[in-house]
Amino acid sequence: MTAAPAVSIKNLKIALPKGAERPYAVDGISIDLIPGEIVCVVGESGSGKSMCAHALMGLLPDTVSTETGEIAFNGGNLLKLDEDGWRDVRGRHIAMVFQEPMTALNPLMRIGDQMMEMFEAHNLLTPKERRAKALGLAREVGLPDPERIVRAYPHQLSGGQRQRAMIAMALALEPAVLVADEPTTALDVTTQAQILKLIRDLQRRRNMAVMFITHDFGVVADIADRVVVLRYGKVVEEGTAAEVLTRPQHDYTKALLAAVPSMHPPVRAPLEGREKAVEVIGLDKTYVTSGGWFKPDRSVRAANEVSFDILQGETLGLVGESGSGKSSVARLVMQLIKPDRGTVRLGDSDLTKLTGRALRIERHRIQMIFQDPFASLNPRRKVGNIISDGPIAHGTDAKVAMQRARELLGLVGLDAGAMERYPHEFSGGQRQRIGIARALALDPEIIVADEAVSALDVSVQAQVLALLEDLKARLGLSMLFITHDLRVAAQICDRIAVMQRGVIVELKPTAQLFASPEHPYTRELLAAVPGQSAPPQAA
Amino acid sequence: MKAFWKSMLRHPGGVIGLVILFITIFIAIFGPTIFPTSPWRMVQRPFLPPFTNPAVLLGTDALGRDVFAGIIYGARVSLLVGMVSTLVALIVGVPLGATAGYFGGRVDDALMRFTEFFQTIPSFPLAIVLVAILQPSIYSIVASIGIVSWPPVARLVRAEVLSLRTREYVQAAIVTGQSNSWIIWREILPNALSPVIVLASLMVATAILLESSLSFLGLGDPNMISWGYMVGAGRTVIRQAWWITVFPGVAILLAVLAMNLVGEGLNDALNPRLAKGSR
Amino acid sequence: MLSFVAQRIVKGVVVLLAIVVMNFFLIRLAPGDPAVVMAGEAGASDPQFVQQLREKFSLDKPLPEQLLSYVKGIVTLDLGFSFRQQMPVSKLISERIGATLLLTLTAFAISLVLGIFFGTLAARFAGSWGDSAITAAALVFYATPIFWLALMAILLFSVYLGWLPSFGYDTVGANYTGLAYVGDVALHLIMPAMTIGLFFMATYTRMTRASMLEVKRLDFVKTARAKGLRDNVIQRRHVLRNALLPVVTLAGVHAGTLIGGAVITETVYAWPGIGRLMYEALLQRDYNLLLGVFVVCSAMVLIFNLITDLVYRLVDPRIEFAS
């Protein structure tokens, strides 16, 4: 660590507008970015990590203001720059990659033109040279068929390809510093692994200083040289990746690290000899989008001969990337969509054969926990009603149902006072608990949890997982647990089914799946999980 | 509700709109009682200029009728037609859109083709044809304005319901065994209401404009005086008596402006996300 | 692309046929004998003409047959005969349609160009007094009845200032030729076109402004800033282009309203187009002519919708043409 920092943030304070939950988004942070080094800035949502990144680009929202501090670069202070000064720095000296590759590109412009804008913005090169450069960049970041891709529009690219295009753009002018704001969060795990490797390679090749914002300690372990842990806008711990990951000093860091689900599945009690709670046989579902009068219909096979069963008291994990059909399977099992073929059997009743009232009555046996804690509760109904609506619809007396709702809130760790409040008054984790209480209100035998912890911060995620595990054991429930995150699945599932393009490619007891994966796709998925490599040594 | 009024009142345009609207409503209801001069009666010599006789403040028209009285009585027609025809459009559009959005598939296809068809037909010419064929009366005017204005309602409601239907809390209601009617009434429609209210208030404005245009062309109810009719009647004598056309026109402008302002205020108050965009 | 156009034309023809069928039933909604209704007030007194109509539309035959012969007539561009004007409806319309196209297209062009200009200006300086002035003016014009605006314009520019002619398409009896004639028509065109144009300009101004402010908050604008692009370039290339998409959609939706505006404006300014023709038909209760104009208006809207749809597809690469 002898090299002089390319940029150093010194005692930066960014004030939030009045009435925010705390006075400073960023409260006295100092970070040095050194050439050839990746600094990971880690924190949960609201820690101020993204603000730091935007401050480096002079792209803070109008509602906040930098109060004190300095960003030293090239012998000057970036915070003193006017808009013209910033424009010169942006892209040329400090470049940025954003979180959402889907929205970060202009949908009406060709990829190549958007790359060429980098040179145009700083009046470099002739149009012809710019075009050649764009092609070279597309090649360098590993975009397939670069000649074609520079002429493509963003919607014609996959998420990973768009993020590569963003990276190509950021690197166009060989900036000294790259700021990456959660660049892989929106991507599938296998794509994430590729993008992380790309950033790492390019950074080494060009000796850049990189500020990498993330919430994921797995990603930190894979990519960081140095780590800065943020909480409520303050640095709680800082050090080399090896130090922080293996010998965390601060309690908060320790708690965060402990909350990260590990890749080692815990030993689980065997469940042999139990009755089957659910049997799913040969589920098929093809979505057809009508092409209109003159166009052939397009069809996607979301579920292809999907079969599995879940024993009483067992948790079956259904793991796959986006578009694998795992959520469709959840909805098919719940009878939210009707399958083209196949059977869902609960004990002796076949759900797929039921319709109307008969189906509504039978529904209480299988309940669902949803992904989005904000969209899964009706904003215009009180929590008490949300929980008791189900039992009342099934004929329970309103008073009894309300009393039961109160008990359930206690069971999921919320105060009975929540009954009279509306969903927007609760945090994400609390809302997810309300969703769990709603599912339990009907005394189901089976719970289907669709990405139930994906939208939560890692510490909250750990709590909700523990709650689910505890309730399941106490109430003797079976569970279908749908997730994209193998680490989470490892912690909670007895068996895991891996899905790819509508097909279950492998279904095995958890420990066995992790120890000896057979299908190449399972192997690829396992290899792509971040945080498996030993923390890199500090340069 | 309190928060709603607070944000509504923070919107200056909305406040102005509400004030004008309340004055117009007041005039429409109580005006004729307070001011009993019939707008059809000859009260003075024809073409009396305004502000010359305090008894006929805004002057008289070509037949010596009081322009001010016409404006007072005309408020009734404008508001009545504006609101009732919007109501008609809502009664047609909301159930149609909700059905299409909730049930989807073929039902949706059929209903939306039907809606698109009506949306393609130029609305003002259709209104003219309808009123002309049904013979001008307050009923035919309300009916034809209702008929030409429901398609946007149906489309909006359909789009809202379509997006709400896939919302996780609606799925949760299905999963917990609620009936279709409960889901539509308790889970979907309350959450689709605010954009419909905003659209309805803007539609009242459009309906007032449509009514005045029809009356201007001589398609108004012959038994009820309306602002559009007054402008139309004064058109041929505009060179001699500007006031006959100017004042009723100002009245239309104010009423329509008020409804538009109220609509914008409602939009900001009910859809806080969009309000941020206008800053 | 071609198959898309073909698809839309087929769809348009279907819609037009549906409108014709609707017309057929509309006439039967009117109180009295359809033949008498069709003949209009003037023609109804001529029993020979009524009888002729009755035969032509097979009015003494069962309903489906009547419908068939009615549709047949329209398909062969026979829109019936106007007794009042003693001329076939199609001839009347073809004589007048040019003036309407000139008026509406000019108004449309003016409103779109100025509306986008002012909307962009207001969005660029959102919150400033200039923005407030533009927004307020747009709000007022949006609420102004077109017929009244037309009269006020006549009062101001013709009666009071004497700058512009208050009615007609050209100066009667002047017999201008060549460029002088074009100038004369242009002079007559200014007020009617501006009258329609102002209302739509207000609409496009509001839409452009709102849409630009919406787009401004999107991620790719941040990306453009992160490149170090000049604000001018960002506004033009990234914000405006995306913001115009909903404006194009709106323009398509407004085709019908544009025609409606023409009916009013042509009436006030005595502009010899089909809008004025509709008003004349209305005055004379000439239903055949009224419905004929209505069918042609609908066809114009369909064509206009097709054009805006094509434009939308050309500017938005996300919508792919059926291949």
Image (cartoon, rainbow, N blue to C red):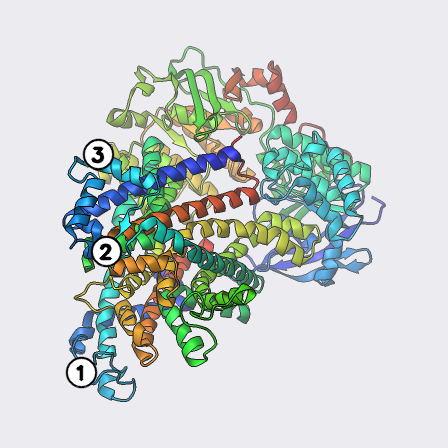
Could you tell me residue B68's position as x and y percent? Answer: 25, 78
- Depth check: C275 or B6 in front? C275
Q: In which quarter of the image is residue B2?
A: bottom left
The residue type indicated by label 3 comes to: Glu
Asked if A355 appears above or below B68 in the picture, the reply is above
Chain bearing mark 2? B
The residue type indicated by label 2 comes to: Ala
Give left or right: position of A250 versus C108: right
Q: How crowded is mark 1: few (under 14 residues within 10 Å), some or many (20 or more)?
A: some
The residue type indicated by label 1 comes to: Val
Q: Quadrant of residue A346?
A: top left
Circle 2 is placed at which residue position? B132
Could you tell me residue A298's position as x and y percent? Answer: 48, 26
Q: How many labels does the image show?
A: 3
Chain bearing mark 1? B
Do the residues bearing badges 1 and 2 touch, measured as CB atoms within 8 Å? Answer: no
* Label 2 secondary element: helix
Asked if A490 appears above or below A456 in the picture, the reply is above
* Label 1 secondary element: loop
Circle 1 is placed at which residue position? B43
Q: Which residue is drawn at 65% across and 38% down?
A: A163
Q: Which residue is drawn at 47% across and 33% down?
A: A452
Q: Distance between the residues labelled 3 and 2?
A: 26 Å
Earlier along the polypeptide chain: callout 1 or callout 2?
1
